[in-house]
Image (cartoon, grey):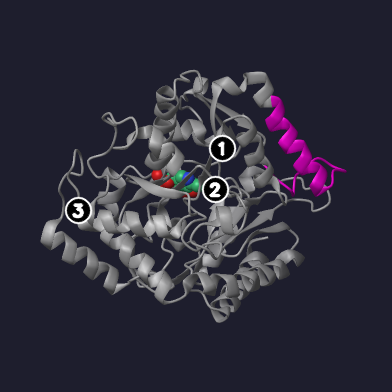
C-alpha cells in the first residue's frame, strides 16, 4: 500500500524529498477522539483530521444517513429548477443557525471553492448594481483562504504561493493582527487603532469605488491561530460599512462549534458579516462540502423572482450534493443533540488554561488561541522572540515526540497547532497536556 501511495498519490502540502525518503503514514481506523494507523498504533486526534471532524470520528449514524441517501438517490443535478431534499433542508437549517439576515446558501465543494465562488458572486453583485469598478478584495498577510487560483491569491501566507503565480490585480493584503508580535511599546488598544488606520489608509489610496470586499477569518487559523485585538473585527466592519465594502467572514475553521457557537462572527466578535463562508465542520469532514451564506440584501440583487431575475450562470456539478448535505444535516443534529457547542464553551477555557501551563518550557514563547483552536509558538529566546533556525524543525520535532506518545498535533513551521475534535472532555485535556509536556521536554 505504501509503495502504491508513494508511486502515484501526489500529496497536498507535502515536501517531495522528505516524503520519498520517509514514505507516508496510513491512517486506517478511527473512533471518537482516536485514530489508528496501519500498524495498530492508536492516537488521540489533536487536530480533528484537519480542523474538521468536529463531532468526532466513527459516527455510524452519519455513515448511515449518507448510505441511505446514496442508495436512494446518490446524485442528480441542482442546476435550473432541479433540487433534492437534503440540500433544501440543509439550506433552511443553515438560515436558522446563521445570523438572522443571512438566509440564502450557495453550495460548493469545500473551503477554497466557497471562497472562490463568493468572490465571483461579489463581483457579479457589483456588476449588477452598476458599479463594475468595485473589484478589489482586501485580505490580510498570513490569511489562509485555500488554494484554488483565486483563493490562493486571497491567502497571504507567502510560503504557500512559493513558485506559484497569483492574481495580484484582484487582491491587496493588509497586515495580519498578531498581538504577540505587535510593534514594541504599543498597547493592544493602540495596535488595534494602528491596524484599523492601515485599512482606512488603504481604502483612501485605492478608492472605495474600486474595492468590493474585505475578507477575514474571525481567528486566523493556518497563519498561526492569531486572535485579533479586542474590537478589531467590529471596527474593520465599520470601515467596510462606511465605504460600501462587503464584509466576508471566512468561518471555514471557526464555524460549527470550534469557538463554542455555530458561527463565531456575531456570537463572539459582534459583527454582522454580509457573507459567511463555511466548510470543514459543516459536514464534520464526513463528506466534501462548502457553503456561502448570503444576506437578504445581496440576494435581492443576485436575482430573485421579485427582484431583477436573470440566469445566475455559476455553480458546480456538486453544488448541493445530496450525500454531502445528508452528512451535514446529521452532523448538525449531533452537535445540537449532544450540546457540543456547550461542551466547547465549558472545556475550551480549561484547555486554554492547561496549555498555558506549558509556558515554563524554554521554547514556548506564546500559548494562544481560543476554545478548541489553540497554538504554541516556539522561539529561541522568549525576551527577544527570536526564532530558532528553520533547520531545527522545532515544530516537527515536538509533533513527532507527541505522536510517539499517542497524540497527533500539527506542526506549522515553528508553531504547533492543537485543534481537536469538539468532544474532548477535561480528562482528555489532562491526558493531551501531559503528553505535550513530555514531548516538549524530549524535543527541546
Ligand atoms: N478557509 C480557511 C479559513 C481554511 O482554514 C481553509 C482550509 O484549511 C480553507 C479556507 C480552504 O478549505 P479547503 O481546504 O476545504 O478548500
Q: Secondary structure at mark 1?
A: loop
In which quarter of the view is residue 427 placed?
bottom right
Of circles 3 and 1, the one toward us is 3
Label 2, ligand 1: CB separation under 8 Å? yes
Q: Which stretch is magenta?
A: 177-201
In the image, farthest residue toward the bottom: 427
In which quarter of the view is residue 317 placed?
top left
At x 38%, y 61%, the residue is 284
At x 36%, y 60%, the residue is 93
Q: Position of residue 403 (x, y in %)?
A: 50, 66
Q: Is residue 162 left or right of residue 303?
A: right
Q: Secondary structure at mark 2?
A: loop
Label 3–label 1 contact, CB within 8 A: no
Q: Is residue 191 shown in magenta?
A: yes
Residue under label 3: 84
Q: Position of residue 196 (x, y in %)?
A: 72, 37
Q: Is residue 104 left or right of residue 440?
A: left
Residue under label 2: 222
Label 3, ligand 1: CB separation under 8 Å? no
Q: CA distance from mark 2 to mark 1?
A: 9 Å
Front residue (pair 356, 362): 356
Determine which of the numbered discs, if any, sits on residue 236 in the image. none
Label 2–label 1 contact, CB within 8 A: yes
The answer to whether 317 is drawn above or below residue 371 in the figure is above
Amino acid at each position: 500500500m505504501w509503495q502504491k501511495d508513494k508511486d502515484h498519490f501526489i500529496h497536498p502540502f507535502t515536501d517531495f524529498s522528505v516524503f520519498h525518503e520517509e514514505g507516508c503514514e496510513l491512517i486506517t481506523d478511527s473512533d471518537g477522539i482516536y485514530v489508528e494507523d496501519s500498524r495498530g498504533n492508536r492516537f488521540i486526534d489533536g487536530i480533528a483530521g484537519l480542523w474538521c471532524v468536529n463531532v468526532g470520528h466513527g459516527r455510524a449514524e452519519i455513515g448511515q444517513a449518507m448510505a441511505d441517501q446514496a442508495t436512494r438517490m446518490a446524485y442528480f443535478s441542482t442546476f435550473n429548477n432541479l433540487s433534492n431534499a437534503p440540500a433544501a433542508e440543509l439550506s433552511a437549517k443553515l438560515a436558522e443557525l446563521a445570523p438572522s439576515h443571512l438566509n440564502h446558501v450557495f453550495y460548493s465543494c469545500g473551503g477554497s471553492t466557497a471562497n472562490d465562488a463568493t468572490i465571483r458572486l461579489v463581483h457579479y453583485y457589483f456588476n449588477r448594481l452598476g458599479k463594475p469598478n468595485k473589484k478589489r478584495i482586501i485580505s490580510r498577510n498570513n490569511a489562509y483562504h485555500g488554494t484554488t487560483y483565486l483563493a490562493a491569491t486571497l491567502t497571504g501566507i507567502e510560503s504557500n504561493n512559493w513558485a506559484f503565480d497569483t492574481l495580484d490585480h484582484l487582491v491587496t493584503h493588509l497586515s495580519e493582527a498578531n498581538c504577540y508580535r505587535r510593534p514594541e511599546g504599543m498597547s493592544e488598544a493602540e495596535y488595534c487603532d494602528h491596524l484599523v488606520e492601515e485599512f482606512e489608509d488603504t481604502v483612501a489610496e485605492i478608492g472605495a469605488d474600486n474595492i468590493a470586499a474585505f475578507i477575514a477569518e474571525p481567528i486566523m487559523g493556518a497563519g498561526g491561530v492569531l486572535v485579533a485585538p479586542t474590537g478589531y473585527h467590529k471596527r474593520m466592519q465599520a470601515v467596510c460599512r462606511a465605504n460600501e465594502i462587503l464584509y466576508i467572514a471566512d468561518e471555514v475553521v471557526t464555524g460549527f462549534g470550534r469557538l463554542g457557537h455555530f458561527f463565531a462572527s456575531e456570537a463572539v466578535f459582534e459583527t454582522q458579516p454580509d457573507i459567511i463562508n463555511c466548510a470543514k465542520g459543516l459536514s464534520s469532514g464526513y463528506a466534501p462540502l462548502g457553503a456561502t451564506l448570503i444576506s437578504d440584501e445581496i440576494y435581492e440583487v443576485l436575482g430573485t423572482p421579485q427582484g431583477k431575475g436573470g440566469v445566475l450562470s455559476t455553480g458546480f456539478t456538486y453544488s448541493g450534493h445530496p450525500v454531502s448535505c445528508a452528512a451535514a444535516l446529521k452532523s448538525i443534529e449531533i452537535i445540537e443533540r449532544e450540546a457540543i457547542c456547550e461542551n466547547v464553551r465549558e472545556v475550551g477555557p480549561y484547555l486554554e488554561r492547561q496549555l498555558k501551563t506549558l509556558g515554563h518550557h524554554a521554547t514556548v514563547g506564546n500559548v494562544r488561541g481560543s476554545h478548541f483552536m489553540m497554538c504554541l509558538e516556539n522561539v529561541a529566546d522568549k525576551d527577544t522572540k527570536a526564532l530558532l533556525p528553520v533547520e531545527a524543525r522545532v515544530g516537527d520535532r515536538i509533533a513527532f515526540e507527541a505522536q510517539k506518545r499517542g497524540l497527533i498535533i500539527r506542526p506549522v513551521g515553528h508553531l504547533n497547532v492543537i485543534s481537536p475534535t469538539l468532544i474532548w472532555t477535561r480528562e482528555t485535556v489532562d491526558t493531551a497536556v501531559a503528553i505535550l509536556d513530555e514531548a516538549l521536554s524530549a524535543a527541546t
